[in-house]
Image: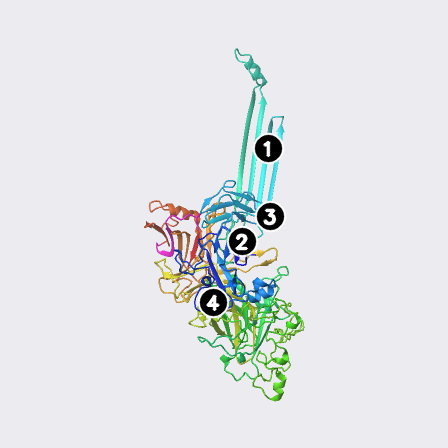
Amino acid sequence: MFKNVYYMGASNISKEGFAVRIVNQRQNPPSEYDMGGKPYITQFGLDSLNESGVRQADELIDMENSSIVNMVSGELVFPTYHPFAYDSLAGGNKNAELQNVLGLGKMYTTTTQTEINNDSRFEMQIEYTNQSSNINLGFMIVEGSEQVFVDGLELKRGVDYQIDYFSGTLVMNEDLNPNAQLNILFDKHEIVSFDKKTILGTRAQMDFGDRSFIGATALYFNQSVINEKIEVGYEPTRNFIWGVNGRYEQPLEGLTRFIDQLPIINTEKASSFSIEGEVAQVMPNPNSINNPETGDPSGVAYIDDFEGAKRTTSFPIQRRFWKPSSPPLIYHSNKTLSHRNRAKMYWYNPYVQWRTKDIWPNQETSIRAQNETTDILVMNYKPLANQTHLPKDSLWAGIIATLYSGDYDQTQTKFFEIWLRNKNGSRSELSVDLGKISEDWDGNGTLNTEDIPVAGMIGDGLLDDAEDVGLDGCADESEDGWGGCLQFGETYNELLESGNTALINVADDIDPNDPNSDNWNYDEGTNDYKRINGTEGNALDAGRYPDTEDLDRTGFLDKTNDYFTKSFTLDDTTYFSGETVKDGQPTGWRLFRIPLSHFEMIDSTGNQEWNEIKFCRVRVTDTTQTWVQIAKIELVGNEWQELGVAPDSSNSYSKANSDSVFAISVINTEDNANYAPPKGVKGEYDRINEIRSKEQSLVLKFDNLSPRHKGAALKTLVNVTGDRAKSYLTYDKMKMYVYGNSPWIGNTETKVEFFMRFGLGEDYYELVQPVYNGWDETENRNTINLDLNWLTQLKLQDSTNVKKLNDTDTFSDSANIKSYTFNDENGISTGKQIKIKGAPALSRIKFFMVG
């Protein structure tokens, strides 16, 4: 067996984009460079030539050397037989620079996986692209529904590709350029569908003799969907077709005999009289969903109802996902707060869940939806007896949770949101840390784990009875009361009785039988949660998995502290966003919304980035006891992209320092007690769960926006071609409800304008109109009700043939921009204006912009 040849996972690998890295996982942090900055790929002999073939390492694998890499077979070959063992065996790696970092070569001498894992040091990371002619689309493809595009050119079935509709396997007949853009659109049969289709047909016919009849045909098709709200392009249709046809035919025997008597003429067939006719009508309804409450009885589809505008990354509320945290860094310092200043904290989910309506009274619930009750997370913080004299900002206790790797990137996130209830009215300080946070809970610099390995540093991942001693790694009698273990065989009680207390914590509330307070105990159904987070003796609670400091399960202790931090008091008003109300009384459940732009780097010289948010730590600071109840923790972004701020005459938006001036968020009927939607607008009713969802609006928030400046948000539509492309040509109106709330907005006068732009590239329609207070439902000046038929006609007209809605309106056409201004009866502008730039089309709308 070749122990220096590695299969890279694919064959026929393209040289473009191919890269190999060898990473030392034992370095902190793991790196592809040794401590002297030299790349391991060079030290292992995979890089000795530059791209010109000159003997000079360039930190790139020598892919032209077939003795090192075979791109066709996908094999990577090391120049020594045992590359990961330093000369301890024949054929071992003889590079002296690797002597102190290579293992013993267990992978070459044993089949015991535990020993191999414990000896492991390096990881190979390979990036490449390769060609594959087989593409799996999933089972049950609708026959004939697929559309295959390569770089925008549609391919033909049977010529360019083959497809098995049942298995969903599509096979390309020709190899594609690896850089080609391949788009495949298709429909799938639903195994379970709650939508309905009704197809009815009837035919009635009356015969008059053998050759005459009159008949009628009726066909009915109705497609209904379970959703009350549907998007443009997914409308349910209803069609009715009726038709009447008939035929009358009468033989004319006398005429036949008469013609036969004429000279020269001899008929071969009998003469007859025949008349036949048919009339039919199609009565189509391309959208059968209506909303008479908003004055829309002829089909309604949504471009965006903003119910899905809020994009969230949610942290779990279940206590098992939260672990005791390492001490935080002191702001802009490499020093951490003392472990000995860690206050007592236990966190838990109450055995009896909260009624959801006691937290969010406006949220609809049902037994079928299983949302009548909600878990909450309670943090109970209490300084030890000997800590109450310490400065407030030196005391702390916190818990930490991990994010899934797919959620690390939070560059598009705008807010940190937390729903909490301050049970005892404390003014304690709550701090939130986001980023790369040390896993070293007790600060001893080594990975604490109950998983005792047979040999080396890694265990088997299962908890044996003898291993269940807690994260401190020692039994109760050897605990020091600070979270660590006593050395040299002393016991806590021996030192306490002898008066030699320098090594132990002798606070009045320390239990000598469990000095570190890490013993697990909970009697189900009781309210005594003090020991529910214990790691010693918690085998049944932890599911027989060993407790470990390795939160992200990489096998190593991460001691990096590169994170963002923000603190606020529990009675804070700056970030207080709202409180729910039940029966006219506040519930105590408050939403705090903190812009991520207000978070600060814990170390001004660090490498904090919002695309590497691995952990969230929540910690409390105070000298008094605090109960914090938490219902929800989320990182919140938006489907709409903030463009920033720009002068009114410019389309060049700047995001520099714009977060404090312009921001987008959402407001809804569940979270915001003071929100009332416009008349007739409501959340969608879920027929399955028998509840109505929240109704939600997009919020454009401006603060100290400079005069004659604007802020804007953009939504880019999914680029779909062919029959699935969204078109607004079948609709007569485009409606939007706008709410005004500002000191600059009144009932009769306003200094604020709203604009909406939609189109493709530099071809677009734009509507600008003033904003008045509230929804302005009396005069409907805030409601956008755009006549799309008139709008498309306006695009084709000029000043000589423009069709004005009012005689006093004005129209101009210059510099590729048409402008239509709405005036009152005296010819004074109402502030409402429509601009058309270029040649936009309702069948080619790719973006919407509002501001």
Front position in the image: 755 or 245: 755
Q: Is residue 100 magenta?
A: no
- Magenta segment, which residues? 826-845
Q: Earlier in the sequence, mark 2 or mark 3?
A: 3
Give the residue type at disc 2.
Answer: Lys
Q: CA distance from mark 2 to mark 1?
A: 40 Å
Give the residue type that dot 3 points to: Lys
Q: Which residue was labeled with disc 4?
A: 96
Instruction: Decide which of tag 3 and tag 1 comes sooner along the chain.
Output: 3
Q: Is residue 816 among the parts visible in the rendering?
A: yes
Residue corresponding to mark 2: 229
Separation (CA) of disc 1 from disc 4: 98 Å
Q: Residues within 10 Å of mark 3 (few under 14, many from 20)?
A: few
**Residue pointed to by mark 3:** 196
The three-letter amino acid code for the residue at tag 4 is Ala
Q: Classify mark 2: helix, strand or loop.
A: loop
Identify residue for label 1: 215
Q: Nearer the viewer, mark 2 or mark 1?
A: 2
